[in-house]
Amino acid sequence: QVQLVESGGGFVQAGGSLRLSCAASGRIASINTMGWYRQAPGKQRDLVADISRSGSTNYVDSVKGRFTISIANAKNTVNLPMNSLTPEDRALYYCQAPRVLSSNGYYDYWGQGTQVTDSS
């Protein structure tokens, strides 16, 4: 079974920084893309950023220049340093890996979520 385990959420002041990490484990044959989504209260879950194994990235406009996604292919880990955080960044952040090939076939996987909250 494949699991995505997130870490790094917490409280931060406006203008501060946090670093989210997500590690995929299990009988994984291949992961092509990993990414981060977020969901604020009362809102839908939206893509924040994703990255392919080749390094191609996508970012939502609101985080460009502030967040930088990276992937460690050998470790099936994706990191998201977040700088200049604003109250609008408050949300539950989810790690996602689509079409992961494992012994179970191709499935999309999600982490449990990690909360980012400002302390103002």
Image (cartoon, rainbow, N blue to C red):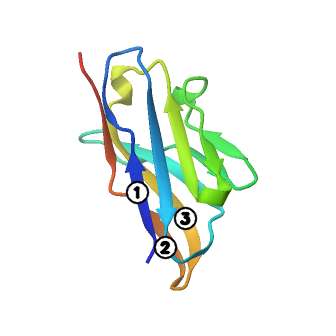
Left or right, 33 with respect to 40, comes to right
Locate the N terminus and report the quarter of the image it occupies.
bottom left
Determine whether, in the image, residue 37 is placed left or right of residue 74.
left
- Location of residue 117 by image quarter: top left
Instruction: Tell me where residue 73 appears, x and y as whole percent.
Output: 66, 56
Q: Tell me the CA gap for discs 1 and 2.
A: 11 Å
Label 3 crowd bin: few (<14), some (14–19), many (20+), radius 10 Å: some
Say if 47 sits above or below 89 in the image: below
Do labels 1 and 2 touch, CB within 8 Å?
Answer: no
Q: Quadrant of the C terminus?
A: top left
Which numbered disc covers residue 5? Answer: 1
Q: Earlier in the sequence, mark 1 or mark 2?
A: 1
Give the residue type that dot 1 points to. Answer: Val
Q: Secondary structure at mark 3?
A: strand
Expressed as whole percent of the image width and height from the top left, the position of residue 54 reads 76, 53
Q: Earlier in the sequence, mark 3 or mark 1?
A: 1
- Residue under the point 32% across and 17% down: 13
Rendered image: mark on residue 98: 3
Callout 2–callout 3 Cβ contact below 8 Å: no
State the residue position of label 2.
Answer: 26
Nearer the camera: disc 3 or disc 1: 1
Residue flagged by tag 3: what amino acid is it? Answer: Pro
